[in-house]
Amino acid sequence: MSSLRILVPVKRVIDYAVKPRVNRAQTAVETANVKHSMNPFDELSIEESVRIREQKNHHKSAPKVEEIVAFSAGPPKSQDILRTAMAMGADRGLHVVVEEKDALEPLGVAKLLKKVVDENKSNLVILGKQSIDDDAGQTGQMLAGLLNWPQATQASKITFNDHTVEVIREVDGGVETLKAKLPMIITTDLRLNEPRYASLPNIMKAKKKKLDKKTLSDYGLDTELRLKTVKVTEPPARKGGVKVEDVDGMISKLKELGAL
Amino acid sequence: MATSARFVSSLRRTALSSRAPSRCQCLRPAYQVRWNGNTPTPTSATSEPHQPDAEGGVKGKAAPRKSIKYTSENYPQLQRDSKFTKISEKHVKFFQELLGSESAVIDGVTKDASEDIEAFNSDWMRKFRGHTKLVLKPSSTEEVSKILKYCNDNMLAVVPQGGNTGLVGGSVPVFDEIVINLQKMNQIHSFDEVSGIMVADAGVILEIADNYLAERNHIFPLDLGAKGSCQIGGNVATNAGGLRLLRYGSFHGNVLGIEAVLPDGTIMDDLSTLRKNNTGYDLKQLFIGGEGTIGIVTKISIICPRRSPAVNVAYFGLESYEHVQKAFREAKGQLSEILSAFELMDSRTQKLVNRVTGKKMPLEGEHPFYCLIETSGSNPDHDGEKLEKFLEHVMETEVVQDGILAQDQTQIQELWSWREGITECLGHDGGVYKYDLSIPIHELYDLVNETRDRLTEAGLVGTDKSHPVVDVVGYGHMGDGNLHLNIPVRRFDKTVEKALEPWVYEWVQKRNGSISAEHGLGVTKKPYVGYSKSDTMIRLMKQIKDLYDPNGIMNPYKYI
Ligand SMILES: Cc1cc2nc3c(=O)[nH]c(=O)nc-3n(C[C@H](O)[C@H](O)[C@H](O)COP(=O)(O)OP(=O)(O)OC[C@H]3O[C@@H](n4cnc5c(N)ncnc54)[C@H](O)[C@@H]3O)c2cc1C
């Protein structure tokens, strides 16, 4: 098998443990002063690409990984997650600065990624199956379409054979095994692996790794938006319970609610 | 943001939960740590809490309260003081008229109310159980005042009770003392956004106070595992320490004012909202950690800090206890105002968590000691910079051997679970003898080694069933000089107890340490106070008690 040049796109999103709040104007989710982290699915992608490289330590026949590039299109702060990706084991970072207000749609990201793939001669792109902020779940598929490459989405296991890549994906009521040849696109699902922690020595090393900064115009692209967000609303609030003093209180409350 | 995004997140959480019970889960009562083992023998050992199920195990629901042995049987040396009047119908009638509402008096004197009363008679750990027949739930300071005056005049003993989560048996009666529960006094009266000062009733539940403050970008300066049940009045009465003490200091500084009712009914209105007030003896301090022995706290005013938007957590492996101390000094020097926790865990505790939970250790390789550092600050960029410099420094100078820095909230929770999961995992093999001690920092860990040596020499420690002791481990709030010495055992055993007590207390005494760092005296530690307080100190404390409570009706048989 030819050696691997892996591209891993990562996205900076509101930390998944934080409860998002809709802004007053109901046009978007509040992002100022809210903790952001790497999209959890993208952590899986980085982890998997590093594991693919580490396999070579144990199995001579495992594919050689020439390079792992972490890529992010997003606001200046996206650098933080690129550093995390590099601390986890990516070799270098590529940051295309896109301000939050000009955020790209999945097709925009896919078009950009196509150029990045060409530029970096990547032959394997591992993406998260979705990002938890907009939940579009489209980028990997669109990129596969634009490149005309095979794709295996929602991977829960990836194995490299002599000439093919085998991907197990979880489907309703069972699993499906796919086989394809490089170059290809894989999107990751929850059970693929458990991402490692960023160790202090690696965090320090990551600071010295190369991080290129580019703009959309460097790729001859522009933010062309096709969708308009009409309104963002919170799910209806769950009604809290009430405490009653005693049995009489409960009976009268139940009567009040028409349950008795 | 679509709801399904969070759905996916929650899925991921489920996927992860095997390796990471989140910090919150460990702390919430729903995930309460349970006492594992049979606890018929009362030792004075306590520290972090356990709640047993019916078989004395940790798997089922908490044990039924009626199965708990009476404190009076466990502590035969305690005798009911005959100076106290036995409650009669006449007294009950007085209280019913005074308090009016039916739910304010649980009367087990004139009728059978044992079902309703049991929850007030026994404690959270299922270790203490009293014989009270009367529970009063006043709704105002005036009612508290009238109750106490009447009790004082009629020589009726009382127990002030908050959320009943105390760990030394202070919150439940020993004999037939009347329980005065503060749960109906639960109003937050004011909060000043500029000064951060909150005034609230003693019966407000800690979590409710903290949520109220969170909405206003502030934080209650105390956080502990029982927050969903304990009351801020109970917290003040026990001078609880908890997780935020290193950063926000103790109640002796944060509580600015107290309104309390003395046994004779006097309302002591010292509900100051002033930061500075040097106008005489600071009497409110006596009620902080007074454990309900000189009066009932009815309101508090407390200064609350701003909530920190930026929180970071790092986890280290270190070569020796010397290195742990160095790391602590560096952390104080370089992280100073943003350092919010410095927790110590020895390798034995971490291996135990690894063994019991099956989670992969956060660091590769083995280290004799581990530390968890948390920073909280106002600016993520500034904090990040400081933390990075500190981390680089301790790595380069080899103060720490290895370490990791949490990259997101999930990892923060996972790393905390290696500290907070210890208590729960300790109960895995059976029971645990637990000591919550203050010791000068440089000698803090010596006690763990010496205890282990002592028990090993006595032939009590081993890997097979013939040895009662599984291990001797140590962890704790290093930043506060607070060690949790824990001895997990396969069974409770008199020889182990004899090897431990009073030896542990004597060891602590020699170093002028405290035999109860956070949890107070209550019933459990009362006999041992001499190890931490001199005769003169005890005499002076008794004078205070006699001055405020000359009839001795407040929480008798405990504290002093
Ligand atoms: C899971 C768990 C974790 C804990 N973690 C910590 C910890 O990290 N640090 C720590 O320091 N403690 C900890 N504790 C113990 C802590 O002391 C109590 O949880 C809490 O402070 C007691 O509050 P409470 O309202 O439940 O009081 P109770 O248990 O009801 O009462 C405690 C004592 O205070 C007295 N009292 C209560 N209310 C009043 C009042 N209004 N006026 C006068 N006296 C009163 C009672 O008579 C009793 O002596 C923990 C307990 C549990 C169960």
Image: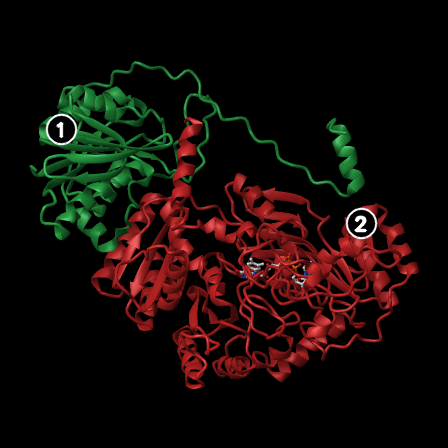
Give me the chain that's red: B
Outermost residue toward the right in this view: B90
Question: For the point 46% across and 78% down, which residue is it?
Answer: B466
* Quadrant in which the N terminus of chain B appears: top left
Label 1, residues with CA under 10 Å away: few <14, some 14-19, many ≥20? some
The kind of secondary structure element at disc 2 is: helix
| Residue A232 against residue A47 in the figure, above or below | above
Question: For the point 41% across and 77% down, which residue is it?
Answer: B462
Question: For the point 32% across and 65% down, which residue is it?
Answer: B327
Rendering coords of residue B302 (x, y %) = 59, 52
Rendering coords of residue B5 (x, y %) = 40, 31
The answer to whether residue B338 is seen in the rendering is: no
Give me the chain that's green: A
Question: Three-letter amino acid code at disc 2?
Answer: Ala
**Which color mode does the image show?**
by chain
Q: Name the residue under label 1.
A: A117
Q: Name the residue under label 2.
A: B104
Rendering coords of residue B449 (x, y %) = 39, 78
**Would you say the beta carbon of the disc 1 residue lies within 8 angstroms of ligand 1?**
no
Question: Three-letter amino acid code at disc 1?
Answer: Val
Nearer-the-camera pick, B287 or A66: A66
User: On what subunit does the disc labeled 1 rest?
Assistant: A
Q: Is residue B396 left or right of residue A249?
A: left
How many marks on residues?
A: 2
Q: In which quarter of the image is residue A247?
A: top right
Nearer-the-camera pick, B317 or B16: B16
Label 2, residues with CA under 10 Å away: few <14, some 14-19, many ≥20? many
Taking the image in four quarters, ligand 1 sits in the one at bottom right
Q: Is residue B443 left or right of residue B76?
A: left
User: On what subunit does the disc labeled 2 rest?
Assistant: B
